[in-house]
Image: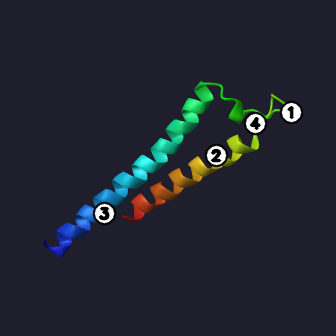
Amino acid sequence: MNPAVKSVIYTMLDIITSYLVSNTLHLVLSVLKRSYSHFLKNPKEPELDSTFHTVFSDLVSFVYMFTSAIRLVI
């Protein structure tokens, strides 16, 4: 196979994989929010978000930002 074609295929697979990873994490977070999961609320103070929610939201944001930056380079 031509090296240029191989490179294009790998690039396309990288873009698709990064898109799926970032959107899957966002989907998980959205489902947890819509289902009013107990993971998202602080057990001691229900008005506040839990540490899990804060860390997972930051992770989703970071992965989305990172994959978007990679797509700009590609």
- Which residue is at 47% across, 56% downward? 67
Q: Residue 64 in the image: state x and y as whole percent.
A: 51, 51
The type of residue carrying mark 3 is: Thr
- Which residue is at 47% across, 60% downward? 69
Q: Is label 2 in contact with label 4 (beta carbons under 8 Å)?
A: no
* Earlier residue among tags 3 and 4: 3
Q: CA distance from mark 1 to mark 4?
A: 10 Å
- Which residue is at 75% across, 36% downward? 49
Given this view, does label 2 or label 3 mark the residue nearer the observer?
A: 2
Residue holding disc 1: 44
The type of residue carrying mark 1 is: Lys
Residue holding disc 4: 49
The type of residue carrying mark 4 is: Asp
Given this view, does label 3 or label 1 mark the residue nearer the observer?
A: 1
Eyeballing the image, is 29 above or below 59?
above
Q: Is label 2 in contact with label 1 (beta carbons under 8 Å)?
A: no
* Earlier residue among tags 2 and 1: 1
Eyeballing the image, is 45 above or below 21?
above
Given this view, does label 1 or label 4 mark the residue nearer the observer?
A: 1
Residue at the top extreme? 35
Eyeballing the image, is 1 above or below 37?
below
Q: Can you say which quadrant of the picture contains the N terminus?
A: bottom left
Determine whether the residue tagged by mark 3 lies in a helix, strand or loop. Answer: helix
Residue holding disc 3: 11
Residue holding disc 2: 56
Determine whether the residue tagged by mark 1 lies in a helix, strand or loop. Answer: loop
